[in-house]
Image (cartoon, grey):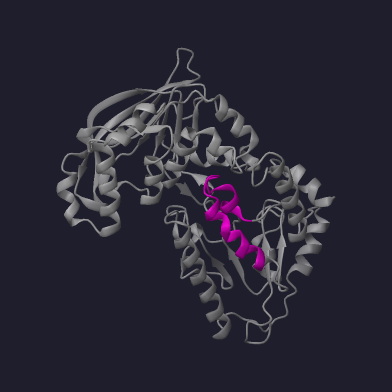
Amino acid sequence: TGDKTHQNVHVDIYERLPVPFGLVRFGVAPDHPEVKNVINTFTQTAKHSRCRFYGNVNVGKDVSVGELKQAYHAVVLSYGAEGNRSMGVPGEGLAGVYSAKDFVGWYNGHPSCRELNPDLNCETAVILGQGNVALDVARVLLSPIDILKKTDITQPALEALVRSQIRRVLIVGRRGPVQVACTIKELREMVNLPGTKSEMVEADFDGVTEALKDLPRPRKRLTELLLKTALDTPGDKEQQRRHQASRTWGFRFFRSPSEVLADADGNKTVGIRLAVTRLEGSGEGARAVLTGEVEDVTCGLVISSIGYKSHPIDPSVPFDTRRAVIPNTMGRSMFPSGLYCSGWLKTGPTGVIATTMNNSFDTARSLVEDMESEALDLSSVKTGSEVISALLEERGVKSVSFSDWEKIDSVEMSRGEASGKPREKILTVEEMIQVART
C-alpha cells in the first residue's frame, strides 16, 4: 500500500461459503428482517472499487494463513465461534438432542445443517439456556405458521413446523430470574406471541420483588416484565387471550441438566433429568450450586443453547485453547505482527450484534494506527489477491465473486416472490455455485 493515507488500501474478503453475510444470513431469526438491514451497508462496502469478495474459499484448508500473510501486509481473522459448548451429560448424543446452533442453522438454511431434519413429533420441547438464541428457537417453534410463511425461513423447516406437534416449550436456566441472559425486546416478543400463553413457577420468583430496587435500569426493566408475566393477575382482555391460546411456554429457573433420558431401546429422547440448584451470592456474580434434588421432565426434543466457542483454523495462528480466542490486545494478535482478529474470535462469545460491530471498529482502528506509526511494515510490495488467486486456481478452488453472489441473490428473491416470501434460500453449496456460474 506504500503511501501513509488509507486512500489506496485494498481489502479482500475471503469467505468459506459461496454467499456473504455470515450470521446476518444464518444466525438472525427469520422473523427479525429489520436486523438484516445491515446487509445494505455491507453491500455498499463490498461494491467499493478497492474491495473484493472471494466466496467459496476455506481459509486453513484451501489456502493457509501463512500464505495470506505472505501476500498481504495485514490479515484480519473474524471467522467467529462455530463450535458448541457441550452439556457434558449422559444421553447428549441421543436422537432428539440438538445444539441451538445446528437447529438455527437448519431453519435458516446453512448448508451444513440441511440434513438435520429434527423430529418435531412430540408435545414438549426443552431448551437449555435462556439467552436470545434460546428465545429465537422457542419463538420459531411456537409461532403461528401465518407469521413464519412470510419470512425467509427455509421451505423444509416451514413444512416441518406445519406438521409439528410441539405445544409446550420450557426454557431452562441454572440461575434465577435476576440472572436471565436474554434482553427485554426478545422477552417482550415471547410475552406477546399470538396463540401462546406463559406458564411459570411462582416459587422461582421468591425474593425477586425485593431485589428489584438494587438492579441497574436495563436489568430492572427486564425483571419487572418477567415478574408481571409470571405473577400478575391478568385483566379481562389478557384473560381471554390466554383462554384462546393453544400453546404454552415458560422459563424454568434453578435447574441444570444432569441426564437426557432415553426410551426403552436406548435410542430416542423421552425426557430430561434436571438437577435443582440454589444460588450462592447475588446479582450478576451469583453462582448456581447443586442441592442434590432432581426433577424429571417428559419431552421429545432437547435443544442446548448454552454458548459457543471458537476453533483454531490454522496451526500457525496463536490460539488460547482455554479461553478459545486468539490472544490479542485491541485486536492485535500477540504475535506475529500483521495478524489481527475481530468478533467472538477476539472477545469470546458474548454480546449482541452492536457490541460486536463496535468491537470490529476497534480492530480496524488498531490496524490503521499500526499503518500510521509504521508498526506495520508497508515498505515491501505485496500483490494480495494476484498471488492468492493463482494459488487457488492451481488447487482447483473456484472462488465466487460479489457479482456471482448477486446472481444467487436475485434467484433467491425471485423464488421467494413466487410464494410471498422475501427470499427462498438455496440450501446447498453445489446449487449456489451452479447458479453463480450461469
Look at 25% across and 32% down and name the residue there. 201
Describe residue 435's horizontal placement relative to residue 59 as left or right: right
Image point (69%, 74%), residue name:
10
Q: Is residue 437 left or right of residue 58?
A: right
Name the spot of residue 197 as percent of width and height, x first.
36, 33
Image coordinates of residue 315 in percent, x first then y, are 59, 56
Find residue 55 and report its image quarter: bottom right
**Residue, x 17% and y 55% (percent of image)?**
213
Image quadrant containing the N terminus: bottom right
Q: Which residues are magenta?
A: 21-44
Above or below, 104 against 92 in this view is: below
- Percent across and percent down for residue 203 are 20, 34
* Whether residue 115 is visible: no
Q: Looking at the picture, does residue 119 appear above or below residue 303?
A: above
Instruction: Please tell me whether the stretch drawn in magenta is mainly helix, strand or loop.
Output: helix
Residue 333 location, x and y as percent? 51, 68
Q: Residue at x 50, y 64 (%)?
A: 357
Name the residue furthest right: 438
Furthest toward the front, the residue is 236
Is 341 inside the magenta-drawn segment?
no
Left or right side of 269 for 399: right
Camera-side residue: 205 or 275? 205
Tell me, yes or no, if residue 262 can be seen here: yes
Q: How many marks?
A: 0
